[in-house]
Amino acid sequence: MSRMLRTRQSQLDEVSKQIIEQLQQDGRRSYSEIGKVVGLSEAAIRQRVQKLTESGVMQVVAVTDPMRLGFKRQAMIGIKCMGNATDVAEALTKFASVDYVVLTAGSFDVLAEVVCEDDEDLIQLLNSQIRALPGVISSETFVYLKLHKQFYSWGTR
């Protein structure tokens, strides 16, 4: 078993996993409700949630539908790089329209999900920002037509 996997598993006991799963089902669930399910006090749940968020294991956020908030264009952009793809990925994280960046293996070196106000905003992002980055060789844009599923409740292991 890899060292990274052992570290991840060792920092999450069964109670912490149950807390995460409760919040994945409903991020607004109260600490007292969670406490009843996992058998701890409200204060103990608050402390554990704070520890989990401060350590970066989880975030509690509101997930929105960008289309309903006036953003008319979402896309996934596959980017081919020359040199260190990590530099390109890091640069992409600084763009407000970019909400997701991953290094990949295969046809693309980096994938970036973007949320734009409209097609003009997407064109500007592609031409003036993404394609202008040092190390970017090419990009391919996959425009989202309709979001069918977006859930974050896969649980823990």
Image (cartoon, rainbow, N blue to C red):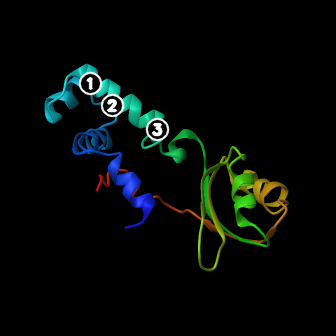
- Label 1 belongs to which residue? 44
How many angstroms separate mark 2 from mark 1 (CA)? 6 Å
- Label 3 belongs to which residue? 55
Assign a secondary structure to mark 2.
Answer: helix
Looking at the rendered structure, the kind of residue marked 3 is: Ser
How many angstroms separate mark 3 from mark 2 (CA)? 11 Å
In the picture, which quadrant includes the N terminus?
bottom left
Assign a secondary structure to mark 1.
Answer: helix
Density class for disc 1 (Cα within 10 Å; few <14, some 14-19, many ≥20) is some
Q: Is residue 59 above or below residue 127?
A: above
Total residue callouts: 3
Q: Position of residue 65 (x, y in %)?
A: 48, 45
- Label 2 belongs to which residue? 48
**98 or 70: which is nearer to us?**
98
Q: Residue at x 32, y 55 (%)?
A: 154
Q: Are marks 2 and 1 in contact (CB under 8 Å)?
A: yes
Density class for disc 3 (Cα within 10 Å; few <14, some 14-19, many ≥20) is few
Looking at the rendered structure, the kind of residue marked 2 is: Arg
Q: Position of residue 77 (x, y in %)?
A: 65, 65
Looking at the rendered structure, the kind of residue marked 1 is: Ala
Q: Earlier in the sequence, mark 3 or mark 1?
A: 1
Q: Is residue 67 above or below residue 138?
A: above
Q: Earlier in the sequence, mark 3 or mark 2?
A: 2
> Is residue 151 visible from the viewing direction of this image?
no
